[in-house]
Image: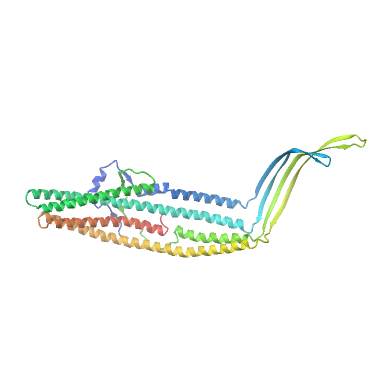
Amino acid sequence: MKSKILAITLNLLLFCAPYLNAQDSLQYLSLSTVRSEALKNNEDMLRAQNNRQSAVYDRRAAFRSALPTVDASAGALFMGDQEIMGNTLVMQGAYLAGFTLSQPIYTGGKITYGNKMAKIGLQCSDEQLRQIRAKVIADADNAYFTWIAVRSKVRMLEAYHAQIDSIMRVVETGVNAKLATSGDLLRIQAKRSELDYQLLRTQNGEKLCLMAVANVMGLTLPDNAVPTDTIIEPSVSVELNNDISQRPEYALLEKNIDIKHLQYKMQIADYLPTIALTAGYTWYGNIKFKGTTMLPDGTPYNYTQEMKAHIPMAGLVLKLPILDWGINFQKIRKARLEEENAKLDFKQNTRLLSLEAQQAMQNLTSGQQLIISARTAREQAQENLRIMTMKYNNQLITLTDLMDAQSQWQQALSNEIEALTQLKIYETEYLRTTGRLE
């Protein structure tokens, strides 16, 4: 890699600098501002942040599933009096209240597996957040540098247009003085009309690019916004490689296998016994019996007896699955196949991720080589234009020769602008495909 390209600027047209500096009312936008606003306002980023917080809640819930639970209940009963064996049962305001404590002791490993799955789920949400963050940054860079490229072409065409206007005035003077032909004037007018068309199209493209930047940022930008990071400096200075081990997509594929394996174990746990400890305390009262009895002397006696008590309770509950007609066994076989599919997905997708990283690495290498070629071609075309202009002023060449030299300069400069801006897009894409875009 030609890492010696330390600083290449898009301000190739020096006459543009006074134009920009003179407009103090312009709103300047740096790449870091575009990135930060995009990350702050992007809906996918906001959803990913919410999903991560949801995973945090799942992790907390899974951890606390091993802790004892306490339930309380209370109730009151009002019903009509009932005759029972000569007595009257009165339940006007009878009450029942209590609490129950449950502590799982052994669940076949479900609690352990559930905690592991929740932990992996949180890690997956972190990787998904990294993945979306990298995509948002890549989209922001793409929009920003495309905007720079089109804007630079507008400035170039404006300069070219000024040159053509200058030549046309000279030709018009020559025609009036019988030193140039009307054909020369028509030729330069046709070129000027062509430039008018190109300039209008490019100006419209600049507006569309600004709209794209605004859309990425999630904001509304004024028409006088100006990019500031027009100096192209390679960000990747280390030796290139297509290692994808740091990429979030790679981590997600690995963790998907872990989750499927834990789901398989969860299905096996349904075949194992579960043991739980339960304890509680119950209060009931205001249950009355009314009746009449005979005293020893034969005198009738009316009595009322109230029932109330508080009862402690403790127990150990064992649950052992015996027969389910093979339903859970089918679920175990299905979970095993899903784990195998996750391994196949890992094998297939890692191969595709490596190919994507290799292509990005090749694009970056080619992009740096293209800059050298485009810069050389532009310097040659610029020198050729200088010489041809001097010859034309000395009437040594025709107007057609001069216009051809100008067209070559325009195309060479356009190629250099595209190569410069495309380099930054390639760099961002390379960092994204290797998991190093932060």
Question: Residue shown at 75%/38% (left/top)?
Answer: 80
Could you tell me how many numbered marks the image carries? 0
Name the residue at the right extreme. 297
Residue 249 in the figure: left or right of residue 227: right
Please tell me which residue lies in front, 331 or 47: 331
Does the image show residue 339?
Answer: yes
Vertical placement of residue 373 versus 74, above or below: below
Please tell me which residue lies in front, 184 or 9: 184
- The x, y position of residue 418, in whole percent, is 29, 56
Does the image show residue 243?
Answer: no
Question: Residue shown at 29%/61% (left/top)?
Answer: 370
State the quadrant of the N terminus: bottom left
- The x, y position of residue 343, in whole percent, is 50, 64
Residue 102 in the figure: left or right of residue 298: left
Residue 52 in the figure: left or right of residue 318: left
Question: Residue shown at 20%/56% (left/top)?
Answer: 407
Colour pattern of the rendering: rainbow
Q: Quadrant of residue 135?
A: bottom left
Vertical placement of residue 75 versus 435, above or below: above
Name the residue at the left extreme. 178
State the quadrant of the C terminus: bottom left
Vertical placement of residue 171 versus 367, above or below: above
- The x, y position of residue 326, in whole percent, is 63, 63
Question: Residue shown at 24%/50% (left/top)?
Answer: 199
Residue 21 in the figure: left or right of residue 322: left
- The x, y position of residue 127, in whole percent, is 47, 55
